[in-house]
């Protein structure tokens, strides 16, 4: 379980509703993958976490367990931001209010827009393929922990292994990222 300070909960809620408003397919899997891609890109480009929430290695790609539960069981943390509609195509995420950018930097907004421009028209299968690409953080982590064969043979659907978003950064950038991430986690724990 990830603990969310009120500012981080607001940021998560607004990020999810922004993605839901702008993605061609505003469904659970697409939202999960696009949110992950925003986090990954923020770390790669700016060496800081976007939300700093953990993403586990699951068979269908990286998943934030807390967000997965919010988009599966009905929102609790995000109830003021989104509603879920169960239809024949999956779980559709519908924004309940207007996007508020108070918690976002200009770089974060730019990264969200860039990710949505590049990947926002992809369906779940295309996004899963994108996160599974050779050299991706998901694939590197799955290989390192010998999960690929179990996933491919459907002997496992999920794992508790968390993707290290800063693993491919140079040592100084990685140290900076880890320091910022730790500070955010402490702030979240203290702002309960």
Image: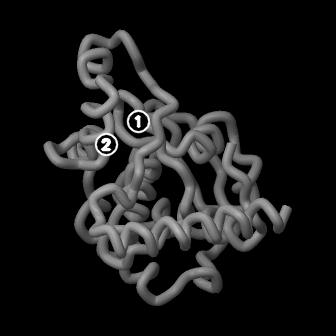
List the single residue furthest toward the left: 134
* Residue at the disc numbered 1: 57
Residue 186: percent from the left, percent from the top? 71, 64
Whole-percent x, y for residue 116 in the image: 33, 67
Residue 118 visible within the image: yes
Toward which corner of the image does residue 108 lie, by quadrant? bottom left
Question: Which quarter of the picture shows residue 138?
Answer: top left
Q: Which callout, 2 or 1, points at the residue further toward the start of the chain?
A: 1
Q: Residue furthest bottom?
A: 106
Q: Residues at badges 2 and 1 in contact (C-beta under 8 Å)?
A: yes
* Residue at the image position 32 percent from the left and 68 percent from the top: 171
Residue situated furthest right in the rendering: 192
Which image quarter is the N terminus in? top right
How far is disc 2 from disc 1 in space, using C-alphas?
A: 6 Å
Q: Secondary structure at mark 1?
A: strand
Residue designated by label 2: 138
59 up-or-down from 54: above or below: above
Left or right, 143 with reference to 177: left
Q: Is residue 180 above or below residue 102?
A: above
Q: Is residue 116 visible?
A: no
Give the percent coordinates (x, y) of residue 18: 51, 69
Left or right of 14 on screen, residue 188:
right
- Position above or below: 61 against 100: above
The quadrant holding residue 44 is bottom left
Camera-nearest residue between 184 and 76:
184
Tell me the tag on residue 155. none
């Amino acid at each position: 379980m990830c603990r969310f300070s009120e500012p981080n909960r607001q940021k998560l809620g607004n990020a999810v509703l922004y993605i839901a408003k702008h993605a061609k397919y505003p469904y659970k899997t697409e939202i999960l993958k696009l949110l992950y891609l925003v986090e990954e890109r923020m770390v790669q480009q700016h060496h800081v976490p976007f939300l700093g929430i953990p993403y586990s290695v699951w068979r269908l790609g990286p998943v934030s367990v807390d967000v997965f539960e919010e988009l599966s069981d009905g929102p609790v943390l995000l109830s003021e931001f989104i509603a879920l509609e169960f239809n024949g195509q999956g779980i559709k995420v519908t924004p309940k209010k207007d996007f508020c950018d108070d918690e976002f930097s200009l770089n974060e907004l730019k990264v969200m827009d860039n990710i949505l421009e590049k990947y926002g028209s992809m369906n779940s299968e295309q996004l899963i393929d994108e996160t599974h690409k050779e050299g991706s953080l998901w694939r590197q982590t799955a290989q390192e922990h010998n999960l690929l064969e179990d996933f491919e043979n459907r002997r496992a659907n999920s794992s508790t292994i968390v993707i290290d978003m800063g693993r491919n950064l140079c040592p100084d950038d990685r140290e900076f990222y880890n320091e910022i991430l730790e500070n955010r986690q402490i702030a979240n724990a203290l702002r309960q």
